[in-house]
Image (spheres, rainbow, N blue to C red):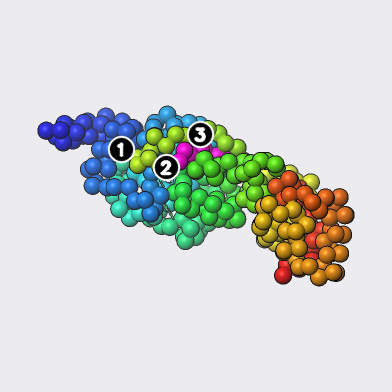
Amino acid sequence: ILNKQFNKLTEESMKNQIEIGNPTRTRAILEKYGLSAKKSLGQNFLTDPNVLVNIVDAAEINDGDDVIEVGPGIGSLTEQIAKRAHQVLAFEIDQNLIPVLDETLAPYDNITIINEDVLKVNVNEVVVEHFDGQHPIKLVANLPYYITTPILKSFMASSLPIAKMVVMMQKEVADRLTAQPGDKEYGSLSVVVQYRMQTQVEFTVPARVFVPQPKVDSAIVSLTPRKDWPVYPADDRDFFKTVHGCFMHRRKNLWNNMQGLYGKAPETKEKIQSVLDELEIDPHIRPERLTVVDFINLHNQIQTVGLKRK
Ligand code: SAM
């Protein structure tokens, strides 16, 4: 009897077009398709219409924007984006969700779903095919947490002109992306991401609004491209390697980390000393005290004196 009542509720909610992210409708959709969330694909469906609206608000989406979404799931966030955006392009790896999305998103004519792994597909090619190039592009997603950083890094490294990213991730990763020098979460990820993007935690989201509930709380982070540094690295890739190398041993000071990176030969030590002298950086400083600009200067000076990693 219970099941019957539940099914009735389902049909009614579908007919009345209750939002996909409404907890009752989400349960009904999962039930109808016999779906259980796949942990291996980071499937945690968001079931709070207010949070969904707050995400699109944070992204300031309007009908002039084209939006890329990673992992539409059963379409709850996609729906809210589509209500405001010009076009939506969503990449979903799970083939089982495609027929679900066909049904849940049927009322919208501005959504294209691509059944591909976003880390393997050539996103630029797909974008050129589906967007007209006349609208600003935004990335909006409740990311699969197991690949948050690879996804962000691949979009940052791509040549796509992304005006803004607004993405949900684990709170702990959000803290690292937005940490400032001296914070305990400040590390190579903070520097590498903040070199490219201005980052900000928009709001946090409790685990209880997801089905199933993840073990940790989440946060929405906005990232906007920044191109206002007083200096730029001579070579971006090598800059990233320098940053990672300097944070190799967080508890060691910069001098020891640099010796670990470049070696301890007397002439190498002399070069390291000359780099730090030139920049007036105290060799005893811990890497987490250095700002993004400090790291850019460090990298450029290392290149100038010709220090080579071991
Ligand atoms: N957007 C939905 C929501 O907010 O309820 C679902 C978000 S869920 C956290 C992450 C989604 O990303 C899942 O639908 C999952 O199948 C999908 N996904 C996981 N790995 C992916 C990949 N490599 N490429 C594309 N989608 C992926």
| Residues marked 3 and 2 touching at CB (< 8 Å) | no
Q: Residue at x 67, y 56 (%)?
A: 249
* Residue 81 location (% of width, % of height): 44, 38
Instruction: Mark 1 or mark 2: name the one nearer the start of the chain.
Output: 1
Mark nearer the viewer, 3 or 2: 2
Q: Amino acid at mark 1?
A: Thr
Residue 26, numbered circle: 1
Could you give the CA–CA distance between mark 1 and mark 3, rounded to whole angstroms?
Answer: 22 Å
Select label 1 or label 3 by which is in front: 3
Which secondary structure class fits the magenta region best? strand
Measure how far apart labels 1 and 2 are at the Cα level: 20 Å
* Residue 40 coordinates in the image, percent (x, y): 38, 54
First to last magenta residue range: 216-224
Kindly report which numbered mark, 1 or 2, lies closer to the viewer in this rendering: 2
For disc 2, the marked residue is: 215
Say which mark, if any, is on residue 204: 3
Asked whether residue 248 is in view, the answer is yes
Dot 1 lies on which element? helix
Q: Rate crowding at label 3 as few (under 14), some (14 to 19) or many (20 or more) other CA atoms within 10 Å.
A: some
